Amino acid sequence: MIKPKIIAGGLIASVLAGSFCLNVLGWEYQTSLMLGITVLVATYWITEALPIPVTSLLPFFPSPCFWHCQS
């Protein structure tokens, strides 16, 4: 069963974690991006907001897209 409130919370948490590390800690863009994706996947995995097979495939889609757009 899909849980929309947890999905939204996971997205907000991942954006906050990535932007905090990018702006406050001075990490590089790709490092902050991977932290955000990791927080998102961990949130969905622990709460099972999405089915586990869908959650396990999440890192494969945004990572290449963002790295390709950066270069």
Image (cartoon, grey):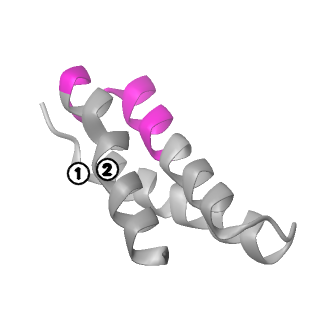
User: At x 41% / y 53%, what residue is drawn?
Assistant: 63
SS at mark 2 in the image: helix
List x then y, in percent, for residue 29.
65, 69
Look at the magenta stretch and give its main secondary structure. helix
The picture places residue 13, in percent across and down from the top left corner, at 54, 56
**Three-letter code for the amino acid on which mark 1 is drawn:** Pro
Residue 66 x %, y % = 41, 66
Q: Residue at x 47, y 37 (%)?
A: 43
User: Residue 7, labelled with which disc?
Assistant: 2
What residue sits right under mark 1 in the picture? 4
Looking at the image, is 35 positioned above or below residue 18?
A: above
Asked which quadrant contains residue 53, the reply is top left
Neighbour tally class for label 2: few under 14, some 14-19, many 20 plus, Cα within 10 Å: some
Furthest residue in direction left, as rendered: 1
Q: Is residue 49 visible?
A: no
Callout 1 touching callout 2 (CB < 8 Å) = yes
Per the image, label 1 sits on a secondary structure element best described as helix
- Numbered range of the magenta stretch: 40-53
Residue 36, numbered circle: none
Tell me the quarter of the picture where residue 19 sits.
bottom right
